[in-house]
């Protein structure tokens, strides 16, 4: 190799070129030749490796090797051979220029570290893409863990690179770095918080990719599409994207709708406001009219017999309705709501069904529907709920009740 590296130098001197210029021209031409050789070697090895991986992916049933190709792992591996050749050749090219040789050596070593980091990154991205295809891991924050490993790898790589460039031993460099630990913690504060938050989110199973969450503080209301080290991306129902700091998931309150999604039904919880002045005891005439409602008739007949038996047994004076036991229009309406819900095809009968009376307010007496729709899809859920309240609002006058409504301009005109 020594003869080859100085062959051109000797030829130039034979042609009458000065010794200094012969050395520089010899080095320059050898550098150009080395660059050409490295380019050709890199190109050939790259094609060989990519071709081999292509054949492997065609025969293999797993997607792992496909992700290796997509993340350019074979291409990065192909760069190893040219670096080795350059490392072995540099001493012969720059033997007359030790200072330049030292700089080039350091540059090659630093590039070797960078190449190693590229390979690690492509492997980690491959693992990330592959894990997302596994049913048990596709909803986990894989991005966060990959980013942590990548940050750790880059941190170690930068330490080695600085050690090579400065010529300082690694342990001495780390000692000097320890004195600046407070600054490092300040710089990487969000990364550290994000890493801790990602671990807690994963361990406690607080959020998964695909979950519907509502985070009022950040204006997020939609599906989680990505969880990484520093942020959580939520695609809202209007198709906008909201970005939330990962550590906010453990420091602030938010709502995760996964329980509803996994349940057998979606809750309906809405009240009708009844004017209290329209509430009264039912007269016999009103009771007879309400018996014409088919689902109420058996209940009213049975209830009427029980009440009459009690009043007769206790000699109650029914000339005044408040005496003894009586039915009220609000009570019968509440029973009607309960029976209607139990007969509605869109209500899940295996879950809680209740028509309850809430505390009176300045607007009136709320009668709340508490039930679960059997269809959890948003569009169908809204249709079922609207169908129920369309009917109940229209049914209120049949019980001689009135719904509360703030007066409008037409009311004042009348």
Image (tube, rainbow, N blue to C red):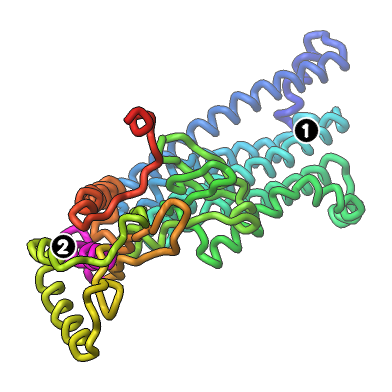
- Residue at position x 64%, y 25% in the image: 35
Range covered by the magenta-colored residues: 330-350
Q: Residues within 10 Å of mark 2 (few under 14, many from 20)?
A: some
In the rendering, at what x and y percent does residue 338 appear? 24, 66
- Residue at position x 54%, y 67% in the image: 204
Q: Which residue bears the numbered disc 2?
A: 286
Q: Which residue bears the numbered disc 1?
A: 104
Instruction: Confirm whether the magenta stretch covers residue 34.
Output: no
Q: Quadrant of the N terminus?
A: top right
In the rendering, at what x and y percent does residue 245 appear? 62, 47
Q: Is residue 54 visible?
A: yes
Which type of secondary structure does the marked residue at label 2 adopt? helix
In the displayed structure, would residue 215 be above or below residue 313?
Answer: above
Q: Quadrant of the C terminus?
A: top left
Tell me, for residue 80, which label it has, or none.
none
In the rendering, at what x and y percent does residue 3 appear? 73, 31
In the rendering, at what x and y percent does residue 266 appear? 32, 59
80 or 63: nearer the eye?
A: 63
Of badges 2 and 1, the one in the foreground is 2
Q: Is residue 348 visible?
A: no
In the displayed structure, would residue 41 be above or below residue 157?
Answer: above
Q: CA distance from mark 2 to mark 1?
A: 103 Å
Which type of secondary structure does the marked residue at label 1 adopt? helix
- Residue at position x 82%, y 33% in the image: 103
Query: On the picture, is 141 further left or further right than 317?
Result: right
In the displayed structure, would residue 392 be above or below residue 92?
Answer: below
């Amino acid at each position: 190799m020594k003869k080859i590296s100085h062959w051109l130098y000797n030829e130039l001197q034979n042609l009458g070129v000065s010794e200094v210029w012969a050395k520089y021209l010899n080095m320059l031409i050898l550098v150009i030749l080395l660059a050409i050789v490295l380019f050709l070697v890199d190109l050939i090895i790259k094609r060989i490796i990519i071709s081999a991986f292509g054949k492997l992916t065609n025969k293999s049933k797993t997607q792992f090797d496909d992700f290796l190709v997509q993340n350019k792992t074979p291409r990065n591996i192909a760069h190893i051979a040219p670096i080795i050749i350059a490392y072995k050749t540099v001493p012969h090219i720059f033997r007359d220029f030790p200072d330049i040789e030292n700089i080039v050596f350091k540059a090659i070593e630093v590039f070797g570290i960078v190449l190693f980091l590229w390979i690690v990154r492509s492997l980690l991205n491959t693992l990330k893409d592959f894990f997302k295809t596994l049913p048990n891991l596709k909803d986990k924050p894989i991005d966060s863990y990959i980013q942590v490993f990548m940050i750790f790898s880059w941190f170690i790589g930068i330490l080695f690179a600085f050690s090579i460039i400065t010529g300082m031993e690694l342990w001495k460099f780390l000692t000097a770095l320890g004195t600046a630990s407070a600054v490092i913690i300040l710089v990487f504060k969000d990364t550290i918080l994000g890493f801790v938050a990602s671990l807690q989110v994963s361990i406690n199973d607080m959020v998964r990719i695909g979950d519907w969450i509502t985070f009022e503080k950040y204006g997020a209301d939609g599906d989680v599409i990505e969880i990484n080290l520093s942020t959580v991306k939520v695609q809202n129902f209007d198709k906008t994207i909201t970005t939330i700091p990962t550590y906010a998931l453990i420091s602030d309150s938010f709502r995760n709708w996964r329980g509803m999604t996994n349940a057998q039904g979606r809750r309906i919880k809405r009240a009708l406001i009844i004017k209290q002045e329209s509430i009264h005891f039912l007269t016999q005439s009103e009771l007879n009219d309400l018996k014409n409602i088919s689902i109420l008739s058996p209940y009213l007949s049975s209830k009427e017999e029980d009440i009459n038996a009690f009043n007769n047994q206790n000699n109650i004076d029914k000339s005044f309705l408040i005496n003894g036991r009586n039915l009220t229009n609000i009570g019968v309406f509440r029973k009607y709501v309960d029976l209607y819900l139990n007969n509605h095809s869109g209500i899940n009968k295996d879950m809680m069904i209740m028509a309850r009376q809430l505390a009176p307010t300045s607007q009136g007496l709320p009668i709340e529907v508490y039930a679960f729709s059997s269809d959890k899809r948003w569009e169908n859920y809204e249709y079922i709920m609207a169908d129920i309240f369309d009917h109940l609002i229209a049914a209120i006058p049949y019980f001689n009740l009135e719904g509360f409504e703030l007066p409008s301009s037409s009311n004042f005109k009348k």
